[in-house]
Amino acid sequence: MLVSLHGDGNEDIEPGQAPQSVGNEVEDLSVFSSSNMVIGCRMFTVADLFLRNKSVFLVADCALYFVICILVFALFRNYLGFARLRLWIAEGFVENKEGKTLAKDYFRELLNRSLIEVAAKRSDGRVKTCRIHHLLRDIITSKSTDQGFAVTAKEENCGWPDKVRRLSIQNTLQALQWNWSLSQLRSLYMFGVEKSLMNSFLSSDMKLLNVLDMQAVPLTRFPAQVADWCYLRYLSFRFTEVSTIPSSIGKLQNLETLDLKHTNVTELPVEILKLRRLRHLLVYRYKTISYSSFKFGFKALKGIGALHSLQKLCYIEADEESSSSVMRELGMLTQLDRLAILKFRKENGRDLCLSISKLTRLQAISVASVNDDEIIDLQHLSSPPPFLQRIYLRGRLEALPHWLPSLSSLLKLHLRCSRLKDDPLVSLQNLPNLVHLELLQVYEGSSLCFKEKAFKKLKTLGLDHFDELRCVEVEKGAMPYLEKFIIQRCKLLEKLPSGIEHLTKLKVLEIFDMPDELIKKLVQGGQDDDYQKVAHVPEIYCGYWRDGGWDVDQCRQMVPAPKALA
């Protein structure tokens, strides 16, 4: 049986009636069928996609939820950020009960079936962006429009169905005209549109919206009418100039994601605490100048422990007056998997540790002290979260947290401004799954030694601003899988690490703002010992930060020889 993608869900909805879920939009596990495309009863694989007489045939046994999820790609430009998988939940494509887990499972399955591919990964192996083949993109874009599932507007004179459920407006269209009603619209995505067009859409009747995603649009104020769109689950004003959030946001009782990244918002109204379904609260921006990175979050709210559904909370600023009670309340957010805190104070350490011990699902934590001289005291944590994968600490440490070496799941560790007296490598070298380690102004000693069999899975290592460091040694067998090595601002380190030639997997070496003599050797090449030590490294970059910009020399980039034709 072949059915329409909108099914009964395309019926008009009366005011006050709950919008149908996507489950009602498709009544059967069968999907598209046309003279150019057939989807039958087998899995998608790369081998199933082929060209014949200019027709594309897809033979598949894709369950409904896989087909629907991949249609989301038609709404975006070339790449889709992994974090946008939460849109699958907001759209109703994935059950709320286990939404996040199922979304990841679906994503992995789509990868396995070669329907999508990874475009970029993060240093710890997580997917950063993904994409689909342009041929498949053209197909799903065309079929999504034909079936009334979604429309992507890239040109002024596009053809449209009479009714549209999901609309993506891309580029800077100025003269887009439409003559259809938006009253049944469920999702609106805007990317880089002109102000007049943006205002036209925002003034339309769109009270059934589930998703409003407005990125990099000329928006300076929170649109008042948005607070009346009570079915919203996903709201994003990322990369806009919005600076205040009205108290009326408390009316959005179905909201699950509030994305205010890279806006000017620094404070939220207390009414935000009414949003008991909120899962992702992202309010922060940052500025990077040379080596310095400045993050700005939002003032922590008393009572934040009431948001029991929160999974991501970034970045709260620990207000001096209420910080102690807020730190204790964090322990009530037992669904958290990511937590980020700014302006942390030493006296809040015990309360935060008590809360962290209750956050058994926590996978990533970031803590930055109120200034770089303030001590971060996390020694009171007796039972760290078992699945902790990423830790970012900025501020002084009297010692490394005693529980840190026990984290078998830890993949990524950033330490900044720790200024430890004892060598941190001793405690960190046996972390079994650590793949990314960055140390900035962490150690006040004069030497570092990477021991044999230490850091068995490390792929990325950064050493920055070690003021007293004069010697680095890499023993044979240390860091056997290291691929990227960055050394910066170690002014007394006049030679490359002894034993760097043992790092046979090294692909990239970056040397920035180091002694002139060392950089000179690498730039000029020749028979110098330091240069010969890294003769096996394909890419070497050297340079300085000068006059507000980087002056970088690419000392070498080896191009692999072309493979012989079969």
Image (cartoon, rainbow, N blue to C red):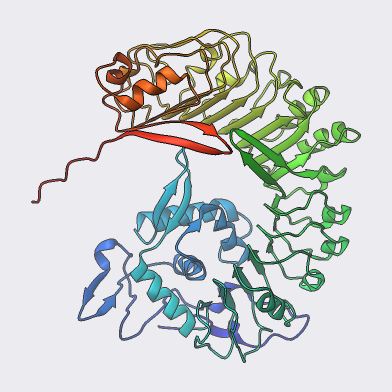
Please report the residue visible at 53 percent of the width from the left and 27 percent of the height from the top: 438
Quarter of the figure with residue 241: bottom right
Is 11 on the left or on the right of 132, as rendered?
Answer: right
Please report the residue visible at 74 percent of the width from the left and 64 percent of the height from the top: 254
Q: Name the residue at the right extreme.
A: 321
Is 40 on the left or on the right of 120, as rendered?
Answer: left
Is 512 on the left or on the right of 361, as rendered?
Answer: left
Is 14 on the left or on the right of 154, as rendered?
Answer: right
Q: How many marks?
A: 0
Nearer-the-camera pick, 209 or 297: 297
Pinpoint residue 267: horizontal percent, then vertical percent.
83, 49
Indicate the quadrant containing the N terminus: top left, top right, bottom left or bottom right: bottom left
Nearer-the-camera pick, 551 or 144: 551
Pinpoint residue 109: horizontal percent, then vertical percent.
41, 55
Q: Name the residue at the front extreme.
A: 547
**Above or below 364: residue 448:** above
Would residue 385 be visible to someone looking at this image? no
Would residue 455 be visible to someone looking at this image? yes
**Above or below 400: residue 447:** above
Quarter of the figure with residue 207: bottom right
Please report the residue visible at 63 percent of the width from the left and 59 percent of the height from the top: 96
Nearer-the-camera pick, 174 or 283: 174
Pinpoint residue 25: horizontal percent, then vertical percent.
55, 78
Nearer-the-camera pick, 468 or 404: 468
**Above or below 326: residue 256:** below
Pinpoint residue 160: horizontal percent, then vertical percent.
53, 87
Quarter of the figure with residue 17: bottom right
